[in-house]
Amino acid sequence: MAQAAEDIERVMAAALLAVDRPAGPDGTMRIGAFTSFLRSVLVPSLADWRARFPHIRVGLVEDDLPQLSKLLRRGELDVLVVELDASGDPPDLPPGVIEEPLLDEPWRLVVPAGTVLRDDGIDLDRLAVPWLGVDETSASSAASSRLRRGSGSAPETLHRYYETTTALALVAAGEGMALVPALALGEAVPEGVDVLDLHGLGTRRIVMRSTKKRTNDAMVRAARELIHEAVATVDLEGRSTQVD
């Protein structure tokens, strides 16, 4: 019942935005998020949001998690979208911050083309490919570290990437393998990369954070509803290839 009431509140908040009346102190909705969510979910929604709510300006902010969390606590963001490795230990929430789930998506293993033959079984322990280094603040880092601890697989390269596009370029060059989320594969996978969907990789959890003191803020409630609406249109099935 409580969840249903929250859903109704979010729908009502979005409906009120469509009425010609002020919707917040300055008519601006500020959303912070990580790269793949911004690019694949939020940016494609902007034109629709602008057409439906012409008196609301939407500002998207891309940065690393520590900086975005500071902006949320200072009230410079209405909501913040965060990525986590769902198979790892959940992090402690900062004081005064609440969290709600948005989406669980599978991790994919990207390897140089031809690393795994189609009639071979896929065994991480036996892949003769090193792991690409990844920025430690990302969920990909937590997930790949978890897999390496569990399997004792290949060491890490000297490379270190931040964006998935960089990881895919390095994989295509034969420099190593990496874990990437399905959502980040919305763009064309470069030639020279095989995308493997195999058991045991786990999932990336995408959550939305806001502050307790702004729970009843109309702009925050509207932002939450619009983001839930955008997430509902995501098609993860078309974002991967599979090597059996």
Image (tube, rainbow, N blue to C red):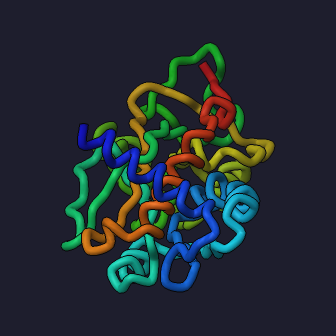
The residue drawn where x is 56% and y is 76% is: 22
Of 88 and 42, which appears nearest the observer? 42
The quadrant of the picture occupied by the N terminus is top left
Above or below — where is 181 with respect to 175? above
The residue drawn where x is 45% and y is 77% is: 77
- Figure quadrant of residue 79: bottom left
Q: Position of residue 217 (x, y in %)?
A: 38, 70
The quadrant of the picture occupied by the C terminus is top right
Q: Position of residue 216 (x, y in %)?
A: 33, 66
Say whether residue 89 is visible: yes
The residue drawn where x is 73% and y is 56% is: 48
Outermost residue on the right side: it is 191
Q: Position of residue 122 (x, y in %)?
A: 50, 24
Say whether residue 32 is left or right of residue 59: left
Outermost residue on the front side: it is 20
Say whether residue 241 is left or right of residue 157: right
The residue drawn where x is 45% and y is 43% is: 103
Say whether residue 159 is visible: no
